[in-house]
Amino acid sequence: MNGRRPRRRGARLNRRLRPYYYIAPALIFLTVLMAFPLFEGLRLSFTDTNMLNPRGGSYVGMENYAELATDEKFRRTLRITLVYTVLCVVGAVGCGLLAALGMNVMVGRVSRRLRGVVIIPWAAPIIPVALVSAWILDNELGVLNWALKAVGAIDEHVYWLGNEKTAMPAIIAVTVWRIFPFSAIVLLAALQGVPKDLYEAAQIDGASRFARFRNITVPSIMPTMSILVLFVTIWSLRRF
């Protein structure tokens, strides 16, 4: 009897600790590759560490942050980043919503095939996408310039990535094209979760399509869209 009790206690303890065993590899991965670099970077920000002396910096307090706040280059970069983020979020979520609404009304093989086509930009590796995009936007050999010139939209080739007025819109367009499929698939799942009874009841009451969209669709998918906007915002801020 005395020998069974310790074994039972050990078994109960093992059952309690088993979930922690399962998540331990993920916790170690996050700690080593994310948490430690984050806190180390925060610590170094309070020192005068530089690239030539990455470990020997002395403590300088808030001097780095004070200098950063008065740096015009930093403020300009921050403005560009915010504009890029806002336009990418609006474009990706907006295009994703339109695509999701279109796929939601389709049925059968057409809907399944369209989903496969829509997801291609998101599934494509980022490096080939960047290289192909740079080739399309090239001022001499780019397909975009040749196509626009062929239809008479432009008279001479445009240097899309070398012009201050066109570089940002070009990059935003490529970014939106790549990330809107994720928004489309997420919003499509949310749309398919809206009860059909609500639409039928609203239609019987004489509600128009726009009224049904505003009063039923939008409130139903808003929680999903809020999380989606948060994710796309974080990805846009982190995108290099």
Image (cartoon, rainbow, N blue to C red):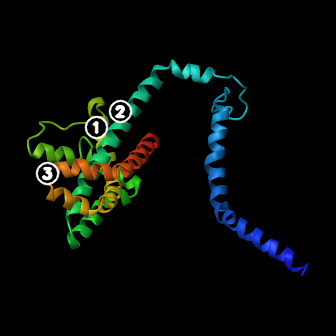
SS at mark 3?
A: loop
Q: Is 186 placed left or right of 234 in the picture?
A: left
Q: Residue under label 3, please give it.
A: 208
| Residue that appears at 86% across and 74% down | 6
Q: Nearer the viewer, residue 204 or 50?
A: 204
Q: Residue under label 1, please give it.
A: 169
Q: Give the percent coordinates (x, y) of residue 109.
A: 22, 73
Q: Residue 120 appears in which quarter of the rendering? A: bottom left
Q: Going from the N terminus, do you reach mark 3 or mark 2 first?
A: 2
Q: CA distance from mark 2 to mark 1?
A: 10 Å
How would you rate the neighbour count of disc 1 (Cα within 10 Å): few for under 14, some for 14-19, many for 20 or more? some
SS at mark 1?
A: helix
Disc 2 vs disc 1: which is toward the camera? 2
| Residue that appears at 40% across and 28% down | 79
Disc 3 vs disc 2: which is toward the camera? 3
Furthest residue in direction left, as rendered: 152
SS at mark 2?
A: helix
Q: Residue 200 appears in which quarter of the rendering? A: bottom left
Q: Give the percent coordinates (x, y) of residue 205.
A: 15, 55
Q: Are marks 2 and 1 in contact (CB under 8 Å)?
A: no
Where 43 sits versus 131, above or below?
above
Q: Nearer the viewer, residue 19 or 66?
A: 19
Inspect the image, locate mark 3, and give the three-letter code of the amino acid beneath it.
Answer: Ser
Q: CA distance from mark 1 to mark 3?
A: 36 Å
Q: Residue under label 2, please give it.
A: 83
How would you rate the neighbour count of disc 2 (Cα within 10 Å): few for under 14, some for 14-19, many for 20 or more? some
Inspect the image, locate mark 2, and give the three-letter code of the amino acid beneath it.
Answer: Val
| Residue that appears at 20% across and 52% down | 212
Furthest residue in direction right, as rendered: 2
Q: Is 145 placed left or right of 71 in the picture?
A: left
Inspect the image, locate mark 1, and give the three-letter code of the amino acid beneath it.
Answer: Pro
